[in-house]
Image (tube, grey):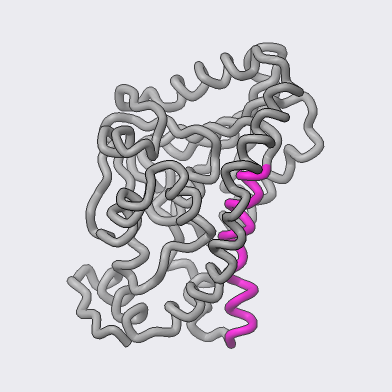
């Protein structure tokens, strides 16, 4: 089995920084089901790690992630699944973002190149996002006849507010530049191209120099207050995605994407 994720620990002040590198080596960094499992396992590996205060998540130099891998054989098998099996399979994404959000450590995303769909869903589950100035974000799910899932809508809403969240999600073909993402409060810092990781490590060192227990407890308090109603608001997330994936519009959206043509949606 190919190892898409590498973890390096013991960095920075008192060795309290860890780096998680997600790189499939293809310049795209799509989130196949196996990549989702590996990234979830990476987050969970820090559950009993009292020696690490900060985790920096980075992709390749050209891509944080292209989002869910529509060409992956396991992913494409979804169209043959019965509803029960499909619902279980669709929990891979929410399980990933929940694992990263619930980490006790402070988490920082270093984004270069592009960050699309599921990549955005993962990034907004972290505490901070730092982005190269020539990078961009895009949320194409609606353009593929799907809905934005993985409980991402509440997280984006907390960061940007209602109007910007609707703009980012509904206008699926529009790229969000780094400067726009910063203006919209979707990312916290924009830096020169190629320096997102360095800037993330600078921030990580500042956090790692603080008292670890106080930092962890503060994160827990802020997250519990900010996300108290998220489960209530998005409890139908997986089922909505499953329903949308059975629509003719979804089939048309994916076929148009793979065929590099403009989709023709009919609302059914």
255 relative to 18, above or below: below
Residue 80 on image: x %, y %? 52, 86
- In the picture shown, does residue 248 fall above or below 140? below
Q: In this image, 59 relative to 264: left or right?
A: right
Tell me what residue is drawn at x 33 percent, y 46 percent.
Answer: 137
Q: Position of residue 163 (x, y in %)?
A: 31, 51
Instruction: Report the residue at 71% width, 29% height from top.
Output: 216
Residue 20 image position (x, y, % from top left): 59, 36
The answer to whether 264 is drawn above or below residue 51 in the figure is below
The magenta stretch is 82-102
Left or right position of 234 against 104: left
Q: Which quadrant of the view contains residue 6?
A: top right
Mark yes or no: residue 1 visible.
no
Q: Position of residue 42 (x, y in %)?
A: 67, 44
Residue toward you, 186 or 33:
186
Examine the image and state in which quarter residue 102 appears. Answer: top right
Which residue is drawn at the image coordinates 61% and 72% (left, top)? 89
Residue lying at 56% horizontally and 60% vertically, measured from the top left? 93
Where the C terminus falls, by quadrant?
Answer: bottom left
């Amino acid at each position: 089995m190919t190892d898409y994720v590498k973890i390096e620990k013991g960095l920075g002040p008192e060795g309290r920084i860890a780096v998680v590198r997600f790189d499939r080596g293809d310049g795209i960094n799509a989130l196949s089901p196996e990549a989702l499992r590996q990234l979830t396992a990476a987050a969970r590996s820090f559950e009993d790690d009292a020696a690490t205060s900060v985790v920096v998540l980075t992709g390749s130099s050209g891509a944080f992630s292209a989002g869910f891998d529509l060409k992956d054989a396991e992913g494409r098998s979804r169209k043959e699944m019965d509803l029960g099996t499909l619902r279980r399979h669709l929990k891979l994404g929410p399980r990933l973002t929940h694992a990263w959000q619930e980490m006790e450590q402070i988490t920082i995303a270093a984004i270069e190149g592009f960050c699309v769909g599921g990549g955005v869903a993962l990034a907004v589950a972290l505490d901070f996002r730092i982005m190269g100035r020539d990078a961009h974000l895009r949320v194409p799910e609606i353009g593929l006849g799907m809905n934005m899932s993985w409980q991402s809508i509440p997280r984006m809403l907390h960061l940007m507010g209602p109007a910007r969240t609707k703009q980012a999600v509904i206008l699926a073909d529009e790229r969000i530049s780094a400067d726009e993402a910063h203006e919209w409060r979707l990312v916290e810092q924009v830096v020169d191209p190629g320096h997102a990781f360095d800037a993330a490590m600078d921030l990580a060192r500042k956090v790692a120099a603080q008292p670890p227990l106080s930092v962890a407890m503060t994160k827990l308090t802020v997250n519990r207050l900010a996300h108290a109603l998220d489960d209530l608001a998005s409890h139908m997330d997986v089922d909505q995605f499953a329903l949308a994936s059975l629509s003719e519009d979804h089939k048309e959206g994916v076929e148009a994407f793979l065929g590099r043509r403009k989709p023709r949606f009919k609302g059914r």
